[in-house]
Amino acid sequence: MKLYEELAEQLRQSIEQGLFVSGDRLPSIRALSREHRVSITTVQEAYRYLEDQGFVESRPKSGYFVRTRACMPTLPEVSRPARRPLDVSQWEDILNMLGAENPSRVFSLGHAMPDLSSPTLKPLLRLWADQARRGDMRVLEYDSLRGTEELRVQIARLASASGCQLHPDDLIITTGCQEALFCALRAVSGPGDVVAVDSPCFYGAMQAIKANGLKVMEIPTHAEYGISVEALELALEQWPIKAILVTPTCNNPLGYSMSEERKRALYQLAQRFDIAIIEDDIYGDLAYAWPRPRTIKSFDTDGRVLLCSSFSKTLAPGLREGWIDPGRYREQVIHNKFVATAASSTLPQFAVAEFIAQGGYERHLRRMRAQYQRNRDLMVDWLERHFPAGTRISYPQGGYLLWVELSQDIDCVELSRELSDEQFRIAPGVLFSASGKYRNCMRINFTRGLDERTLSALTVLAEMIAERQPAPV
Ligand SMILES: Cc1ncc(COP(=O)(O)O)c(C=O)c1O
């Protein structure tokens, strides 16, 4: 590594660690030259290098600043899914992306894994070890069907930030949010029924729909405003839809957070057609703006909203700790939970409950929200400069996932196949559709910003896309 690259790397790390945030003035060239005992030219080269990478910007007569985004990127088009209920396909592709191969060897640019390297997670591991050492035999017993009271109390307490008054007795702990969604779907519908979803839609939700013998009705969705309440109304008039399954806050994969008005309108629509709403709030606590947005559940007066979530995205997916407030579907959901896994693992519940009680969850969230917001801008800037003109990119207000829409000629499924020789994988858009749409789209994870591994994967990807991009006419 050349001297200026070393210096640039140090500065980049300071920015990524949050020592300098968006818009901050960086040390002057002279100051850096003195501090690092390098020449003025080396510092200038380091800054120019960082400018090319999109980390900093120079302002005439003022010096260098951490780059800020002035405006949104060009957002993806409103989706136009099929206008009829469909059977869900795509299982083979999903299996391939999730990686039958060793996931720690192959870097996944598209996986929805949070950053697990933060020191704010360390106390959780310590609490876990303490719990095991304590010799409390409860961790080896079957837990109650609803999960430990300690954790349910903490979840109910946290829910007030989203405008919800949940009671610990109403909550059921599940093995991840995936189980919560599965139990919820089974509770509100029967084989052959239709469930409406936003489109693109998280593939795990669609697989749960498929596994329950249901059909999916994909509804047009906007990358900023969310699922179209108007299109949903038309669909409800036309088809016997039993439930709506939606991730209205920090959506996966589009990143949108619906406004309070639109959430309320969605709830009122569900009331009018007397159907259930399965609300997936798994990324809700990662909203960059705090206090976080309200859930649809917070408007629920008649128990038709089944609120599903987990700690998989806010803390770590390996915990396998999720929960559901099933509203009026309590009996069915408890039965489904019993049939699926009987009880969830007890030890991690004690550890997480203690972590939340000690303030560790809030401390961790504060750090991750700032990191993810910073990394969103770095990633969007980079993609705008290195992906072909005309690329459309989502601009999430929370979480850590981007939706990228390339020109119609780029087939991300093909790209993904060709990457099988490379040490990284992508998540082609087709996974997020029941009918094979979004072949020209992909989801990108920006948890680690532009660290070395991400940057080198992105660079390979940008070259492959450029080779396939048709020349402008
Ligand atoms: C929107 C959404 N819901 C549910 C899940 C499943 O979560 P868990 O790992 O807690 O089962 C995921 C995981 O990627 C997700 O993105």
Image (cartoon, helix red, strand yellow):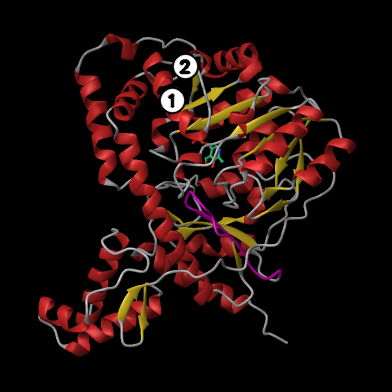
Q: Is residue 270 left or right of residue 308?
A: right
Q: Which residue is mark 2?
A: 168
Q: Is residue 359 above or below residue 171?
A: below
Q: Is residue 156 above or below residue 17?
A: above
Pointers 2 and 1 in contact (CB under 8 A)?
A: yes
Q: Which residue is mark 1?
A: 155
Q: Is residue 57 left or right of residue 287?
A: left
Q: Is residue 98 left or right of residue 27?
A: right
Q: Is residue 71 above or below residue 243?
A: below
For the question of whether residue 115 can be seen, the reply is no
* Alpha carbon separation for disc pair 2 and 1: 8 Å
Question: Residue visible at 51% across and 40% down?
Answer: 284
Q: Is 396 colored magenta in this rendering?
A: yes
x and y, in percent, of residue 85 in the image = 82, 40
Number of numbered callouts drawn: 2
Question: Residue visible at 27% across and 29% down?
Answer: 358
Between discs 2 and 1, the one toward the N terminus: 1
The part of the chain drawn in magenta is 394-408
x and y, in percent, of residue 162 in the image = 51, 34
Q: Secondary structure at mark 2?
A: helix
For the question of whether residue 95 can be seen, the reply is yes
